Image (cartoon, rainbow, N blue to C red):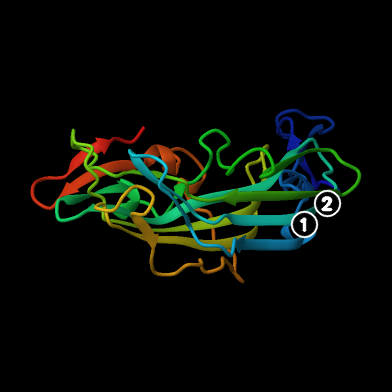
């Protein structure tokens, strides 16, 4: 498409005062190539990116409880796994695109109860107080991405052929919980219950690192719940048992895209933002481990 040229005729002097031939000068103004508007945007569109074999699952196995330490109980949940094969169209310009997984925590309850004394609680204060809708679950280095190994692929343009690749990620919980009250000098086991309920949203995204244009390809929601009862009077190795659901419900791939909230794109990530509180049955709460 050609630019529109406007010719502006300017009379150099009034004809009445200067007899003789009237002279005109020509000023040309290019009224912005309409095509240049499109030039500022990428030619990569959502409908040009093909996603094959999208999968999102949680392993069909129960949470495993470990009682190997006299100091802490550990448990290992099944893995959430997501993967997709991508066909990226040719990139006609000097642009860099990254395709991969972005994840955010959208809800967290994590309580460790010590009889009638009180409970410790891992909390995300901004999320708890409703100040944000989600907090990044990045590895703390690769913002906004969940990780930078199998989780992302970078394509540097221009490319003359489609790019074909796979991106995948996995996530699970493997925490330690003290047998004794975490603010006590005593090592006496008093832990009676562990309850955890955490929700996540995971996005498959293509991001133009030059223009920051973001193309959402898929949205996945998943949840992990753990309920463990503990009898601290029993010997180490036979104190804890899993109750409630043995297997996790499977993730949901949404039929409609959900936007990525701003807090899911940058600092802090959930690990740095969380705080460990001690909430006694009587008395004020106490910060045990502050956010980083």
In the picture of the structure, the residue carrying the numbered disc 2 is 89
Query: Of 125 and 38, which appears nearest the observer?
Result: 125
**Eyeballing the image, is 11 above or below 109?**
above
SS for tag 2? loop
Badge 1 vs badge 2, beta-carbon distance below 8 Å? yes
What is the x, y in percent for residue 291?
33, 36
- The x, y position of residue 22, in whole percent, is 81, 34
The residue closer to the viewer here, 8 or 146, is 146
Q: Indicate the position of residue 137 as horizontal and vertical percent values.
A: 49, 46
Could you classify mark 2 by the number of other residues whose Cα lies within 10 Å: few (under 14), some (14-19), or many (20 or more)?
some
57 sits to left or right of 232: right
Q: Is residue 206 visible?
A: no
Residue carrying label 1: 49
Q: CA distance from mark 1 to mark 2?
A: 6 Å
- Residue lying at 81% horizontally and 39% vertically, measured from the top left: 93
Question: How many numbered circles does the render carry?
Answer: 2
Q: Secondary structure at mark 1?
A: loop
Left/right of residue 126 with respect to residue 44 in the rendered view: left
Of 201 and 110, which appears nearest the observer? 110
Residue drawn 61% across the image and 71% down it: 255
Asked if residue 136 shows in the view, the reply is yes
Circle 1 residues within 10 Å: few <14, some 14–19, many ≥20: some
Q: Residue at x 72, y 58 (%)?
A: 46
- Would you identify the image quadrant in which residue 259 lies? bottom right
On-image quarter of the C terminus: top left
Picture coordinates of residue 156 (x, y %)? 79, 36
């Amino acid at each position: 498409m050609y630019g529109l040229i406007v010719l502006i005729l300017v009379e150099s002097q009034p004809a009445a005062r200067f007899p003789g031939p009237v002279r005109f000068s020509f000023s040309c103004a290019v009224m912005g190539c309409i095509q240049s508007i499109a030039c500022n945007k990428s030619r990569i569109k959502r409908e040009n990116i093909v996603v094959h074999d999208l999968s999102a699952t949680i392993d069909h196995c129960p949470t495993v409880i470990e009682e190997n330490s006299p100091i802490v109980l550990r448990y290992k949940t099944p893995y959430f796994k997501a993967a997709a094969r991508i066909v990226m169209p040719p990139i006609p310009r000097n642009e860099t695109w990254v395709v991969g997984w972005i994840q955010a925590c959208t809800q967290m309850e994590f309580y460790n109860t010590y009889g009638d004394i009180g409970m410790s609680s891992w909390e995300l204060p901004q999320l708890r107080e409703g100040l944000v809708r989600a907090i990044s679950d990045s590895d703390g280095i690769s913002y906004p991405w969940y990780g930078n190994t199998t989780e992302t692929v970078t394509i540097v343009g221009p490319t003359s052929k489609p790019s074909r690749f796979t991106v995948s990620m996995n996530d699970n919980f493997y925490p330690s919980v003290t047998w004794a009250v975490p603010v006590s000098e005593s090592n006496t086991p008093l832990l009676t219950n562990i309850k955890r309920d955490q929700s996540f949203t995971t996005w498959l995204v293509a991001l133009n690192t030059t223009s920051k244009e973001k193309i959402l390809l898929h949205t996945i929601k998943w949840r992990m719940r753990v309920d463990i009862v503990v009898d601290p009077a029993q010997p180490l190795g036979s104190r804890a048992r899993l109750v409630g659901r043995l297997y996790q419900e499977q993730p949901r791939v949404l039929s409609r895209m959900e936007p990525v909230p701003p807090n899911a794109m940058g600092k802090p990530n959930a690990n740095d933002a969380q705080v460990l509180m001690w909430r006694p049955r009587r008395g004020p709460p106490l910060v045990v481990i502050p956010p980083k």
